[in-house]
Amino acid sequence: MSKRLSRRSHFLILAILAQALVLVTAIRIFADNFFVFSILSVAASAAAVFWILGDSSKPPYKLAWIIPILLLPVFGGLFYLFFGRVRLGRRFKAGMKRHATSASREAGKEDGESESLVPSLPPSAARQARYLARYAASPPFSGTKATYLPSGEEALAMMLEKLELAERCIFLEFFIIEDGEVWGKVLEILSRKAALGLDVRVMYDDFGCLERLGKDYPARLEARGIRCAVFNPLKPILAADMNHRDHRKILVIDNSTGFTGGMNLADEYANLKPRFGHWKDNSLMLEGPAVDALARMFLRLWNFAKGESAAIPGRCGEAAEFLDEKGIVQPFEDSPMDDEPVGEQVYLNMIGLAQEYLFITTPYLILDNEMTSALCLAAKGGVDLRIITPHIPDKWYVHMVSRANYRTLLEAGVRIFEYRPGFIHSKTFVADDAFGVVGTINLDFRSLFLHFECGVWMYGSGAVAAMKADFLSTQELCVEMRLRDLEREGKARKALAAALRLFSPLM
């Protein structure tokens, strides 16, 4: 027991509980003067509610917080202040802007060139490309080869192959890294490359690795010659900034080969350790000029986490163009730095432009009104709209909320499939043999509005056909959900699902 309590996660929990206990004790002492206490409680609740109503957050998110605030006048408001604010704190945001600027423009295209490819695109594609260039500072690229990797096993094999070829630099950023066979293979190559003098950097999210890596892990990597950064380290205090995590997965090699997608660097992602049945994941490999965009994404957060202001080192080189490659690729990032929900807008635009079919894979189906309406409208308009979700969940309550969204979609004509062999972690959209998105962005509130995320939007790329083929082959392993399947669920389960759905923006 003492060994378990010595773990950092338990220490953080105990520290936060201690702070909450002090707060409760102080309030109980103050509550002896009931009249003053009741007046202040009502005032605190009213202030918190007005604050929420004036915020730019989504209405479901506001409602999910207003209910507990009204039920628990003081504690609800306090918990909102500590955990509910969507926007980054001023100090956090100022630090991001201060350290990220140089990595943004010095290493990428100039602003005047960012839309140079847009006029050559058909109107449906140009709309999405122009949006990402203007509102996400993410220009489109031609001459880039995109290779879709439909499983964690294939992604790992390709990553290892390309890492062995590294000659100048390796930038690696993942939400989860865990000691095991997958990370062991990667780390062995990183250590060898660092010993040869390559610029090797590793960054991971502190919350994502809380139960997986020790507090001394950065020092252990530095001892191997690998530079290490931990994003937004967890602190034993109640603070809203702890909500904002780095959920991205990025690997850049020599500024010419890059990877992103759903896969983290832990054994279950390559099915080397059984967890929730067979784990279905994916990744996208880019080769060519577009890799520069992934490198800039990495350096923006790296600079913030390390307190640096460095652009891409010149010795990382420039990628050659693949002149025979058709279509464009557009790596993009989404962050809580502003009020622009880039990930959601990319998905909504994909839903709106689909004419024949739209195939979606997602581990979570927690939808707001805009997303639900867009999906239903597309299906009602004749689009063959199919969604694959897990049959074996990683979180039972999230899966219950996902299923609570099935009825509305099924009644509109959306077809929903559950991946029977286990858990599907891929996040993909593919439409009309022309458009595709691969990335880290889940269909839930935290991914869309709280986390740092990334993805790649493609038009006319050869990877789109591979994405479609992977979806159709995966569908063969699924069970299609029907309205009658939902009717078999008991009343108690339906009631619990309805209650959880009300608070789903907080999950």
Image: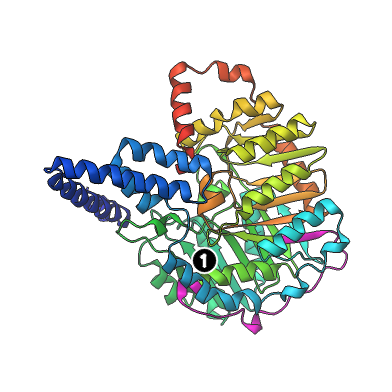
| Number of numbered callouts drawn | 1
**Vertical comparison of 315 with 484: above or below:** below
The one nearer the camera, 196 or 221, is 221
> How crowded is the residue under tag 1: few (<14 C-alpha within 10 Å), some, or many (20+)?
some
The one nearer the camera, 442 or 370, is 370
- Which residue is tagged 1? 187
Stretch of the chain drawn in magenta:
303-330
Residue at left offset 64%, top offset 21%: 482
Residue 406 is situated, as x and y percent measured from the top left of the image, at 60, 28
Q: Tell me, yes or no, if residue 290 can be seen here.
A: yes
Residue at left offset 70%, top offset 64%: 134
Is 309 within the magenta? yes
Is 66 within the magenta? no
Residue 329 is situated, as x and y percent measured from the top left of the image, at 76, 60
Q: In this view, does 370 lie to the left or right of 175?
A: right
Q: In this view, does 387 lie to the left or right of 383?
A: left
Q: Give the amino acid type for the residue marked by disc 1 in the picture.
A: Leu
The one nearer the camera, 417 or 188, is 417
